[in-house]
Image (spheres, rainbow, N blue to C red):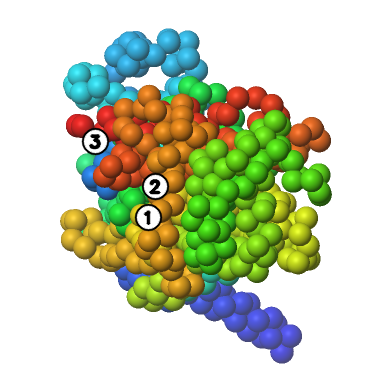
Amino acid sequence: MDNGTKLQKNRIFIVLLLVIGVLAAWNLRLFWIQVAASRSLTERKIDLVENSVIQRAQGLVLDSGRGDFVDRNGVPLTGTAQKTLIVFPIHEEGSTDTSTTMDRVASIVNAPLSAWQSFVRQLKGPAIWSVSGRPVPLTDAQAAKIEALDLKSVRAMTFKQRYAERQPASQVLGFIGQNPERITRQFTDQFHKGELQLTSKIGNSGLEKTFEPWLQGIGPSSVSLFTDGLKRPLPGLDTREIAPSNPYYPLKVVTTLDSGIQQQIERTLERSHVTEGAVVVLDIRNGDTIAMASTPAFQPEHVDLAQGSWSNKALKAVAPGSIFKTVTAAAALEEKAVKADETFECTGALGKYGFTCWKKEGHGTLTLEEGFAQSCNIVFAKVAQRLGGDKLEAYAHRLGLEMSVGWSADVPHRQGFRQWDAEEQGQIYAAASDKSDEGALVQTAIGQRDVLMTPLQATNLIVTLYNQGKVASPRIVREIRFRNDRLYQSFPPHELEQAAKPIKPATAKRLLGWMAETVEHGTGEALRSAKWSLAGKSGTAQVRLKNGRPGENHWFIGYGPAEQPRYAAAVVVQNVPEGGSHKAIPLFKEVMDILADSSEK
């Protein structure tokens, strides 16, 4: 054998050894995956066996695991649990006539046969029988009949719907959705730990956003049907419900809202055809939010960001008109700018700046008290001339205006936490305004020109007067509780720290009395027929509509019952065409009648 032949054989031998080595390594790797790697061997602790089973599972999330909101009485505001029909796209073994059996299901749930058959044919994975995108709830009788069929392709199971079709307090609660940028910026730790993915749904507005850190759950609850490669149920596995077993989570956020009152006010807004505006009701003793309604309506499951109906108008600052005269009156009393028996003459016009009264023929001779009840522009313009712009702004601060009033404080792990989302501060003067300009001053005194106020601030103004000038900081959430109802975190009521020193109790009491006179023989006389005796202040602000035509904001703020006040409320109907009847006063009456009825129950 020559050297060339030996060399060739050696090469073949080496190649064979390499092939054998590769095959041996491959087999060892397969053995390692199948046997040795059954539990958490990678740095990410991925269970390969468990994941191989999951690949054969058709799953559906029944509950996202996110924490829910309840009202002050424990009534759920989100997360309604209901029995629904879940359908799996599988072939029923042993069934002589599967289509006939499935058609029986349609009959049980009162589904149109053609729609049901189309729904079943198009299934690519498990789905809930729905109409117009909403799961159809089952009665107990329907659920029992479905379970009695003993089918693996259909099950009656409890599904948790986060938002109702007519979701109460929708703008207050807000909505959830994907927001990758915020996840990576605000929830970096959870993202790196794998607790949140870029596709995770988080709170994007309202309480869903501000309470997001507490609402994140510890995992979803789901149902899965395990199948083989031919989509047939695997014996012994069948349908399994998978849920985190933790008695403490998810957490429950307890709001200060009264769900019954909230829904009645929302229906009243709809019935009154108010297209744009807000209603706020506060507990007059501590500023707790009993109801907060915003219109136009908003459905959290169908969010149109461009339309803007998701924005809470109760927290947006708009021109207040004559309700701001409460501030001007407080400044006049505190500064003794007006004598006790002094009178003013209203002829319908001030005589300069083109400034007029809403009553063109004038009110005649009026005291400041009478001017408040009749909402006379001329009286308040003359008072403002004595006070000056700096004094007006200073007293607005003392009464909690031109600042965020909603509950905020340091809480564990979160400094400067604010309960309210996107609450606006409002303003008295724009940055470029000249406070020494008398023309601007007289307009400011009646809540025009640059003045902006939120309905929450306006309602809290009444609470401030009732509490002897001390500015409250309204809550919307009272506490957070564990799943087993143990207390996790409380948010005690407190006064607004940023507000300047309060006005005198005597001044506050006097203004409340003037509000009662406004209803007795002033601009609020239409409220005398209400179920409670009421008190308050009306306002009409001149604005410009989107089409460029003149319009108005109609306001009424007040309290009831007048003898023993329980609630403070503000109503604003925005962007009404100029010249129409005042829409806020009758709406305020309806709101107070709702509160009166609820107090009798």
Q: Considering only order in the chain, which callout, 1 or 3, is on the residue closer to the N terminus?
A: 1
Secondary element under disc 2, as helix, strand or loop, is helix
Amino acid marked by disc 1: Lys
The residue that label 3 is drawn on is 599
The x, y position of residue 188, in whole percent, is 52, 72
Residue 235 in view (yes/no)? yes
Residue 161 in view (yes/no)? no
Q: Nearer the viewer, mark 3 or mark 2?
A: 2
Mark 1 neighbour density, 10 Å: few (under 14) some (14–19) many (20 or more): some
Q: Nearer the viewer, mark 3 or mark 1?
A: 1
Between 355 and 551, the one nearer to me in the picture: 355
Between 16 and 466, the one nearer to me in the picture: 466
The x, y position of residue 254, in whole percent, is 30, 53
Mark 3 neighbour density, 10 Å: few (under 14) some (14–19) many (20 or more): few
Q: Measure the C-alpha gap from mark 3 to mark 2.
A: 23 Å
Residue plotted at (32% across, 63% down): 493
Amino acid marked by disc 3: Ser
Q: Are marks 2 and 1 in contact (CB under 8 Å)?
A: yes
Q: Residue furthest bottom?
A: 3
Residue plotted at (58% across, 68% down): 394
The residue that label 1 is drawn on is 509
Quick check: 32 left or right of 461?
left
Secondary element under disc 1, as helix, strand or loop, is helix
Snapshot quadrant of residue 51: bottom left
